[in-house]
Image (tube, rainbow, N blue to C red):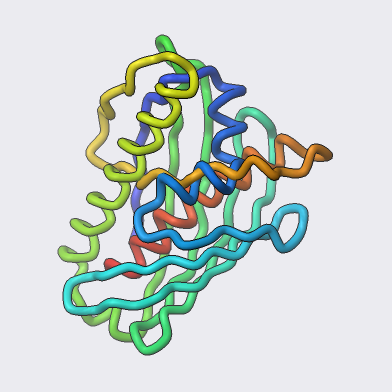
Amino acid sequence: MEMSGEQLIPASQADTWAALNDPEILKACVPGCESIERLADNEYQMLMVARIGPVSAKFKGKLNLSDLNPPHSYAIAFEGQGGAAGFGKGSAQVQLAPGGEGTMLSYQVKANVGGKLAQIGSRLVDAAARKISQDFFNAFNEKMGSLHGAPAAAGHDEHHAEPVPRDPDLPTVSDAALVFLAAGALVVFVVALFALYG
């Protein structure tokens, strides 16, 4: 499955990049996210609970960030297991650019699912992925608006990712990597949710 979209974030590019690399912020914005843990410089582990149609599962996944170009872009590779519900794996590209009174976040996600998740049907999976994406961006924009004094921006694309809480304990050595991590986590969570709901 593939999903792409754009979202206007009500914050500067630097602030958006930092928030996308904050595990606590991502955790707070991603629906069903229970934890985001840093395993290495550009590697994270996430735990979330999701329900896709008749399938409900606790999803545990890892994501790796690469091609970091702060505060402009990065790539994410992810894979996750939902036990008997199935598994998902894929990749995502995230780009940030100045846009209007904020930052335009663009993303492209490619994912594959297996197990019970693959038997649910692509229409249900696509609808669930869009809903998760929309919920994420609504929460993320609200969070960014409250942190930076701007009203939450309305998305202009039907595809939206769910917000993930930001983590204040990011390594100071690589803020860019942290930002990419947060953005990567966002995309990974979206893909994971996509897979779980798919």
Residue 193's spot in the image, x, y percent?
36, 61
Residue 8 is left or right of residue 22, and the answer is: left
The residue lying at 38 percent from left, 74 percent from top is: 113
In the rendered image, which quarter contains the C terminus?
bottom left
- Residue 155 lies in what quarter of the image? top left
Residue 176 is left or right of residue 63, and the answer is: right
- Residue 37 lies in what quarter of the image? bottom right
The residue lying at 50 percent from left, 73 percent from top is: 60
Residue 178's spot in the image, x, y percent?
68, 42
In the rendered image, which quarter contains the N terminus?
bottom left
Give 110 or 17, whichever is nearer the viewer: 17
Residue 43 is left or right of residue 127, and the answer is: right
Residue 32's spot in the image, x, y percent?
36, 60
Q: Which residue reaches farthest top? A: 101
Residue 4 is left or right of residue 170, and the answer is: left
The residue lying at 32 percent from left, 47 percent from top is: 133
The residue lying at 40 percent from left, 14 percent from top is: 150
Residue 183's spot in the image, x, y percent?
54, 43
